[in-house]
Amino acid sequence: MRIAVFSTKKWVRESFDAKAGEFASALTYFDAKLGPDTAVLAREHDAVCAFVNDDVGTEVIDKLADEGVKIVAMRCAGFNNVDVKRATERGIAVVRVPAYSPYAVAEHALGLILTLNRRFHRSYARVRDGNFVLDGLLGFDLHGKTIGVIGTGRIGRVFVDLVSGFGCRVLAHDPYPNEAWATEKGVTYATLEQLYAESDIINLHCPLTHGTYHIINTYAVRSMKKGVMIINTSRGPLIDTDAVIDGLKKGIVGYLGLDVYEEEGDLFFEDFSDQVIQDDTFVRLQTFPNVLITAHQAFFTREAIENIAETTFQNLREVRDSGTSQNAVPE
Ligand code: NAD
């Protein structure tokens, strides 16, 4: 089996080489993102390995199938960028890494909350500049605040464990509520309306689907508490960025922490430090003192990338040996 690995960065190559086993000589690393113009690179490969910002839509699936590719191995949990139905029609198996470290993402979300609240990023810069003034750094106690968690899957549940240590009240929303877990943890399931109306901090831990696209829109923002903090470590399109910018300008959104962004595919994981960024919406976001953006790094811990590499090779092994995998994405 030959495997074309797209969107390769140094850390991808290192973590994959360390875990490749019998696949060591079967890997071809490409820096390029997978998309309609690069799918041809998969020629003479049986599998492609892709990541969160690769385009594995209908056109790409067709091109991969024409090149004889039989497996799309996503090295991430989300598969919103894959046309799974088309892949099934064209005889391509799609596998993913459903869980590699819920701790990595939940801990990063908590990091964004603490940093936005206590302004560590601003105090770090001030103190290094010899400025020891506290004005503008006033925070609030997390203790006693209400945190709204949208999506109580693997990451959402770990996040609840982390914030319960602060003495927060947790409201949760999930179309598949886990009542036994909620009772044990003292979590209350609520409607989105109640969660928006009562939460001081809102955390998004649901997947991107047709139902969750722009779940945070103008209507949602208007139903939130004034000064609310919104944290998104899940997928950019969960938030209508223009609606949140409007909320920031009106003071409804008091803090915004993003690890993902609607149009991140054109920016994240690349170095544009000596270029003019053309995305005006992203640049506008950067102008707010109460917005903190990280570039899709929540998953990026040693443990997580080791698990991603291990599971990806295990998925490929399973499909090679039995035609399917326990981590196959259902159509
Ligand atoms: P999971 O599948 O374990 O849990 C997702 C939960 O969301 C489920 O309980 C599901 O019922 C719920 N859900 C579905 N639709 C919903 C809706 N309309 N409203 C509320 N809840 C809804 O997934 P997970 O492992 O907890 O991951 C959550 C998301 O985190 C992933 O889908 C992925 O997009 C994102 N993620 C981001 C990073 C990163 O580096 N930033 C890394 C890994 C995962």
Image (cartoon, grey):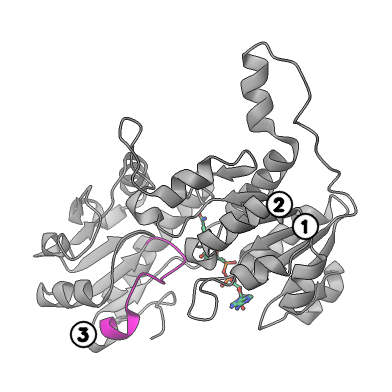
Q: Name the residue under label 2.
A: 251
Marking on residue 75? none
Magenta segment: 75-87
User: Farthest residue toward the front?
Assistant: 250
Question: In screen coordinates, is 237 left or right of 245?
Answer: left
Distance between the alpha carbons at the discs numbered 2 and 3: 50 Å
Task: Tell me which residue sits at (21%, 71%) in the image.
Answer: 60
- Image quarter where the C terminus lies is bottom left
Task: Tell me which residue sits at (72%, 81%) in the image.
Answer: 177
* Contact check, label 2 and label 3, Cβ < 8 Å: no
Q: Helix or strand or loop: what does disc 1 sit on?
A: loop
Q: Mark 1 points at which residue?
A: 226
Local packing at callout 3 (Cα closer than 10 Å; few below 14, some 14-19, many 20+) is some
- Is any part of residue 70 visible from this angle? no
Residue 206 position by quadrant: bottom right
Distance between the alpha carbons at the discs numbered 1 and 3: 50 Å
Residue 85 is inside the magenta segment: yes
Residue 65 position by quadrant: bottom left
* Contact check, label 2 and label 1, Cβ < 8 Å: yes
69 over 256 or under it: above or below: below
Magenta span: predominant SS is loop
Task: Tell me which residue sits at (57%, 63%) in the image.
Answer: 243
Marking on residue 90? 3
